[in-house]
Image (cartoon, helix red, strand yellow):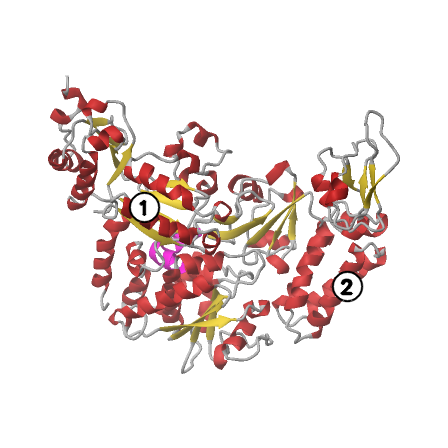
Amino acid sequence: MKSLAELQAIKEKMKSKIVLREGSGEIRVVVGMATCGIAAGARPVLNAFVEEVNNAGLYDKVTVTQTGCVGLCQLEPIVEVYEAGKEKVTYVKMTSDKVKEVVEKHLKNGNIVTEYTVASVN
Amino acid sequence: MIRSHVLICGGTGCTSSGSQTLQKAFNENIEKFGLAEEVKLVQTGCFGLCALGPIVIIYPEGTFYSRVQEADVAEIVEEHLLKGRVVERLVYSDTGADEIVEKAAKDVSLSDTAFYKSQKRIVLRNCGVINPDDIEEYIAMDGYAALGKVLTEMTPEDVIKVVTDSGLRGRGGGGFPTGRKWALCAPNKADQKYVVCNADEGDPGAFMDRSILEGDPHCIIEAMTICGYAVGATKGYVYVRAEYPIAVTRLQKAIDDAKAYGLLGKNIFESGFDFDLEIKLGAGAFVCGEETALMTSIEGNRGEPRPRPPYPAVKGLFGKPTVENNVETFANIPQIILKGAEWFSSMGTEKSKGTKVFALGGKIEHTGLVEIPMGVTLDTIINEIGGGIPNGKKFKAAQTGGPSGGCIPASLINTEVDYDNLVALGCMMGSGGLIVMDEDNCMVDMAKFLLEFTVDESCGKCTPCRVGTKRLLEILDKITEGKGTLEDIDKLEELCNYIKANSLCGLGQTAPNPVLATLKFFREEYIAHVVDKKCPAGVCKSLLSIVIDQDKCIGCGKCAKNCPVDCISKTDYVAPGHKLPSYTIDTSKCIKCGACIAGCKFGAISKK
């Protein structure tokens, strides 16, 4: 290593890999990963979130984590988005494609994708 | 893409409680459940809560699992990592903190526990967070940024000024201002100067330096290089005891990696500054923690102190100007450079700035390592962070500073712990060992124990220490055997003061401290040993006898079976209401091992 710029480059590269250990970001994305969720395809959804959040450079702002059964098994995979000072947003019947949209519109730009939320089901 | 990190503590404590087998089990199970692409296993340094090891923390949730056994691993992987359900039975929570009890166990993360909440981690900030063997993880946590700043933006004088203004004082015991130490060395002209890191941690019960080297070795390398630049030294030594194999291995790997990355060696950051670092292994002699003895040992000679002046800043290692600081002191430096002197001096008390790491041991729930701002009361350390005294016993005293320190009695539990308050009590901070004692500890016996240590470890060079400490120990032996007189107590005090005033180095000058401190706060215990021939805590064997209460004894005979010397026998007496004759102890044969007391279910046997 010869310069500070090189040091900075290593730091940037590693930061996204280690930031996970600094506890909760401003936004928490929680994916239901109980038996019902997994059966409905929650794992690809979870992995898609991790990947998309990283691709969008939101890794120090958004924490992607998992939880057990939320109770609405027929609507799995369910994803809940928590943000301090705001109401919880619940997305249902998620897929990897929908994840891309949620990350781009909601997590990055702050616009809730209402057609995927639980409120749109009825 | 990795979505979860599993941190397994690889410090000495958790390693000895089996964390290496856990690592293997996690690897196997992560593979088995097809999670290898999603979960990363990281071996870290010490988390601090050694009593509850092996410790596993899972991020991003920050779930804190304690006392994890190999058999638990499959469950954690399947439930937590695959299905997102926290294994509640393994989650650690302090029962003392109300708000945590109210929260569901799955929400309890490390930072919520009473053990961590009151801590302020600067020195230990990376311990238990990063993989100490991965230099890039250290860089991700702002590692080597301070060195970069120093070499590209600051003059050596600037660096010394920041360290001086921060108010940082030596964490190894004496509390000498670090900035002043550097400033004394900097102007001295020589063809070679040295930076030495004292990692010869010798106080019984203190292990913070080991944990720092094991958990965050790069911060020491970075700090020593910064120090080298500030004082004009191009060569450094880390003197670490060979008894710390994990620390030595990790530090060596860190040095090799730093060299490979160009962060040690020639022309660092193209500044023209060169710095090289080498490990010297010590054989574990306590006296080698004294700076001049340490340097003599690095030079290849028998570790004996030499008179000061000349001070090491003028004539130190190999006769050249040298700065010597302790591990914990160095560990503060990169953060002070990055965040500024003001940030550091905003923590702590008027004359003791920043934080201090304490190794909690003895009669305390949370045996382990804690870092707290200077000036926190002893009460907070013991009862809040430390979780209090086990088995509902009463706190009696805390021993600080190891064999060089004194003790703080229960009546002074509200003392704010900093350098000057401890010195005022006849104690010293030392390296931060804190041994907690309860009502079952005899203070005379404690002083005797520490003195046995100094008698063993005295290097023998000067007479007051070599002969004086031995005579002190003989008087203490006499007192604990019940043969002491009041005159002995006076003699003890006189000899203590003589040794303090006349010894060559810190070892001898501080060796009488445990005796003087206990005499100051627990004189009545000495008098009880000498006049009443009693040991109030029931520790000193010569002064106690074990007796069976004839009316409580039901005659089961268990004590007689347990007795290793067959000194318990049946009597002819049958207590009212009992069917069998009671037992009695032949005190002339009794070795006072206490096996009978431990075995009696009826509370009929006691120490008198």
| Residue B205 x %, y % | 57, 55
| Residue B516 x %, y % | 71, 57
Q: Three-letter amino acid code at disc 1?
A: Asn
Q: Which mark is residue B474?
A: 2
Q: Residue at the location (39% across, 45% down)?
A: B56
Q: Residues within 10 Å of mark 2 (few under 14, many from 20)?
A: some
Q: Three-letter amino acid code at disc 2?
A: Glu
| Residue A119 x %, y % | 17, 20
| Residue found at the far right of this picture | B572
> Which residues lie in the magenta part?
B332-345
Q: Return the residue nearer the eye: B21 or B223.
A: B21
Q: Quadrant of residue B509?
A: bottom right
Q: Residue at the location (29% across, 58% down)?
A: B139
| Residue B72 x %, y % | 40, 41
Q: Residue at the location (53% across, 72% down)?
A: B294
Residue that label 1 marks: B29
B330 to the left or right of B263: right
Q: Is residue B5 above or below residue B279?
A: above
Q: Residue at the location (51% across, 74% down)?
A: B312
| Residue found at the far bottom of this picture | B191
B571 to the left or right of B208: right
